[in-house]
Image (spheres, rainbow, N blue to C red):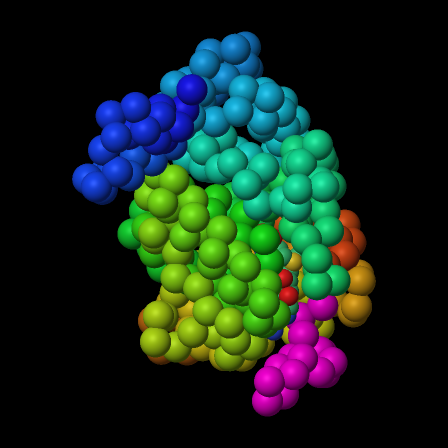
Amino acid sequence: MRRRDFLVGAAGLLGAAATPLRAFANVPTPFSFDMKPPMAPGDKAKFIAWGVKERGEDPKFLGERFDRYLAMVRNEDLVDDRNKIAFLCTPREKFVLKQNLARAYDHAFLDIGYGVTISGPHIVGRMTSAINPQKGEKVLEIGTGSGYQSAYLSHLTDKVSTIEIIKPLAARTRGIYDDLIKDGYSEFKAISSKNADGYYGWQENGPFDKIIVTCGIDHVPPPLLQQLKDGGIMVIPVGPPGAQRVLKVVKTKNADGTITVTRSDIYHGRIVPFVPFTKLEGDSIKGTHNN
Ligand SMILES: C[S@@+](CC[C@H](N)C(=O)[O-])C[C@H]1O[C@@H](n2cnc3c(N)ncnc32)[C@H](O)[C@@H]1O
């Protein structure tokens, strides 16, 4: 019996309805940045036992998460320990639609409604590794979608901002975070979210150390580059519709005050299709920001 069920049962037994029950979360140990789940290649059983005990999670999903983790490490989508731990601590099953639960840890993007998708775990791992957020850094995500990417980021830094253009999706995902926070996933308190057109960034929350864009566009939006700190890194799918290359963009300030922007391809030329970077006109989404 889970703690909360037990308490409700006990209240019934004691007839203590007049005394408000203390709300216990279902996550026994709150996340901390020094959390160290078992993560050696042979640690699957230990990881599952850890996740059940410390995070109150389902052993089935923990096992699938560990298998996907091993595949991502082999594929070099996860390279350093902090990113590996962030992946292992993020319950992807909480961010997929019920009908896709059996596929939560597939090497695939999945439908999340509203014509958009949750990106596949390998892409999320590789893009996050490319910006490698450090604790305390400000990170902006464009394209909240399911909420999974920002949930993952909240295990790397305590300052995450995320923007979603589809109003009901932004509200649904905010509700998922709030429910999970009540459940004990205190790390998601680090996530500020809003419904807006992410092309213009989030001036009041910036400037940002890192920016991650999860929808495809044919150029780097100037407002995002402007809101990136000197020395900051952005990862963004750039290219024609459905045929983007995922670029790592580094902004550097030179001694003479000029700015240099360097670009490299995190997939070494491979085409990776993303959902389009759409445009808000008034209250309606109309077309894209492509030139
Ligand atoms: C690949 S999907 C979602 C991936 C998401 N990061 C996740 O973890 O589920 C990309 C998202 O970008 C959103 N999007 C597209 N254009 C946008 C814009 N101009 N501003 C903000 N979000 C946008 C889409 O509505 C969609 O939810």
Seen in the picture, residue 261 relative to 110 is either above or below; the reply is: below
Q: Is residue 179 above or below residue 164?
A: above
From the image, which quarter does the C terminus lie in? bottom right
Q: Quadrant of ligand 1?
A: bottom right
In the displayed image of the protein, which residue is found farthest to the front? 15
> Can you give x and y, in whole percent of width and height, for residue 74 in the image?
64, 26
Residue 102 pos. (x, y %): 70, 32
Along the line of sight, which residue is nearer the eye, 213 or 245?
213
Q: Quadrant of the N terminus?
A: top left
> Looking at the image, how many numbered discs can be counted on the residues?
0
Residue at 33% over, 35% down: 25
In the depicted view, which residue is nearer to us: 242 or 148?
148
Task: Identify the residue at horizontal 57%, vertical 45% (top origin).
Answer: 95
From where the camera sits, is residue 31 visible?
Answer: no
Q: Residue at x 58, y 26 (%)?
A: 61
Report x, y in % for residue 152.
48, 44
Front residue (pair 248, 105): 105
Left or right: residue 140 versus residue 285 is left
Report whether residue 286 is seen. yes
Question: Does residue 287 show up magenta in the picture?
Answer: yes
Outermost residue toward the bottom? 282
Residue sitting at 45 percent across and 77 percent down?
226
Residue 179 x, y percent position in the rendering: 43, 48
Question: Does residue 266 appear left or right of residue 206 in this picture?
Answer: right
Magenta residues span 276-291
Q: Is residue 212 magenta?
A: no
